[in-house]
Image (cartoon, rainbow, N blue to C red):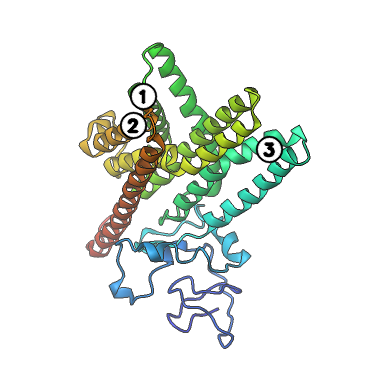
């Protein structure tokens, strides 16, 4: 369907133009786009003229598509980005703020499944539902949060299968690395050492994945870091939930899953995302060098994340939950700042591309 407003050729059955956001009406005529191989979700931009578009955050617009209706085709096209055939060139990437919506659908589906598991355990008293309840409860919010990061990855250069791989392999690898560090520390375990060990374990794992020159953008580091953090958070929550169950308390099991799910977006997922983005900010187009870890741009973010983690784990009578909520808000302020930096990085690369003298090597 060709948009009457901007002339962008959209796939059939979409309700809104994927380029300018115009809503199609009955008078618009469909036209099949045979060359459109991927869903350019980064083209969801503010309803302003193209020359006035900005990478400045407008939160009321970022989430404006969450409650709109979307066709199955729109969702399906999201999942084909990131392959050799469906990764756009840098000049095709939009540096404006994407408008994610799929993450909300993922959460709704997970919530429905969790309610079904809950009914199977609490209403029908069938213990066969307990493993499913723990798994869904542990993964629901981390995967939802990860989907948000994936939709915000404007370069669209990381495929879904890669994300799934990083969640599981990165999650378990970071946990095993943390256990090695804990074994070395033995009795010197406190909130500070916990923060250092777990964040160091995650950042080592993130670097393993982002050191590849293919994933050189700040938004790539943000996404792959979130994937490692999501795996770590989900596996950890599943472990705590099992402990609660083995204590003989079903209500404690529900409470563990509930509170860890509520706080999950501001914990491991956001922290690992920040350190991953900080590393890519330092690495740029260069090969990995251990000296990059001493770069102030990276160390500053890493120290902040460690301190937030340590404060998160510090028991403060009566206000621990409030402290964790405040830390979650601060974490996401930093996340949105990193997204802004990532979008500006894309804008700068496009400017460099357009201003490069003709005939020069890329």
Q: Residue furthest bottom?
A: 27
Q: Position of residue 296 (x, y in %)?
A: 21, 36
Dot 3 lies on which element?
helix
Quadrant housing the C terminus: bottom left
Locate residue 340 relative to residue 92 in the image: left or right: left
- 220 or 62, which is in the foreground? 62
Quadrant housing the N terminus: bottom right
Q: Is residue 91 above or below residue 200?
A: below
How far apart marks 3 and 1 lie (CA) works out to 31 Å
Query: Residue at the spot x=29%, y=74% of the render?
Result: 51
The residue carrying mark 2 is 311
- 161 or 33, which is in the foreground? 161
Mark 2 or mark 3, earlier in chain: 3
Locate residue 279 relative to residue 110 in the image: left or right: left
Q: Is residue 150 above or below residue 197?
A: below
Q: Position of residue 292 (x, y in %)?
A: 26, 33
The residue carrying mark 3 is 132
The number of numbered badges drawn on the structure is 3
Query: Residue at the spot x=40%, y=47% of the render?
Result: 220
Quarter where residue 224 is shown: top left
Q: Are marks 3 and 1 in contact (CB under 8 Å)?
A: no
Mark 1 or mark 2, earlier in chain: 1
The residue carrying mark 1 is 191
Q: Are marks 1 and 2 in contact (CB under 8 Å)?
A: yes
How far apart marks 2 and 3 lie (CA) works out to 32 Å
How far apart marks 1 and 2 lie (CA) works out to 7 Å
Query: Residue at the spot x=35%, y=21% of the render?
Result: 193
Locate residue 242 relative to residue 301 in the image: left or right: right
Q: Nearer the viewer, mark 2 or mark 3?
A: 2
Q: Nearer the viewer, mark 3 or mark 1?
A: 1
Query: Residue at the spot x=72%, y=39% of the render?
Result: 122
Q: Is residue 344 above or below residue 269?
A: below
């Amino acid at each position: 369907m060709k948009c009457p407003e901007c002339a962008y050729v959209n796939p059939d059955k979409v309700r809104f133009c994927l380029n300018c956001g115009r809503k199609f009406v009955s008078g618009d005529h469909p036209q099949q786009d045979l060359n459109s191989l991927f869903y350019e979700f980064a083209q969801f931009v503010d309803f302003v003229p193209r020359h006035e578009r900005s990478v400045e955050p407008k939160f009321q617009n970022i989430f404006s598509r969450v409650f709109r209706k979307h066709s199955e085709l729109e969702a399906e096209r999201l999942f084909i980005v990131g392959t050799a055939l469906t990764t756009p060139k840098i000049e095709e990437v939009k540096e404006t703020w994407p408008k994610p919506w799929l993450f909300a659908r993922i959460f709704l589906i997970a919530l429905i499944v969790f309610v079904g598991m809950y009914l199977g355990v609490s209403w029908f008293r069938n213990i066969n539902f307990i493993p499913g309840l723990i798994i869904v409860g542990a993964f629901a919010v981390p995967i939802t949060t990860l989907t948000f990061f994936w939709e915000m990855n404007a370069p669209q250069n990381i495929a879904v299968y890669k994300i799934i791989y990083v969640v599981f392999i990165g999650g378990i690898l970071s946990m095993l690395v943390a256990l090695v560090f804990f074994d070395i520390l033995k009795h010197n375990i406190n909130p500070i050492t916990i923060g250092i060990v777990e964040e160091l374990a995650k950042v080592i794992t993130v670097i393993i994945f982002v050191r590849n020159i293919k994933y050189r953008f700040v938004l790539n580091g943000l996404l792959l870091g979130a994937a490692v953090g999501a795996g770590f958070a989900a596996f950890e929550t599943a472990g705590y939930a099992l402990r609660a169950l083995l204590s003989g308390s079903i209500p404690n099991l529900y409470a563990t899953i509930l509170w860890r799910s509520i706080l999950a977006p501001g914990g491991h997922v956001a922290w690992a995302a920040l350190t991953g983005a900080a590393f890519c900010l330092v690495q740029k187009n260069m090969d990995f060098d251990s000296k990059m870890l001493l770069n102030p741009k990276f160390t500053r973010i890493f120290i902040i994340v460690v301190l937030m983690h340590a404060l998160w784990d510090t028991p403060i009578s009566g206000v621990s939950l409030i402290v964790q909520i405040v830390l979650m808000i601060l974490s996401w302020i930093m996340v949105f700042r990193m997204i802004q930096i990532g979008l500006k990085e894309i804008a700068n690369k496009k400017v460099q591309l357009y201003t490069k003298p003709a005939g020069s090597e890329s």
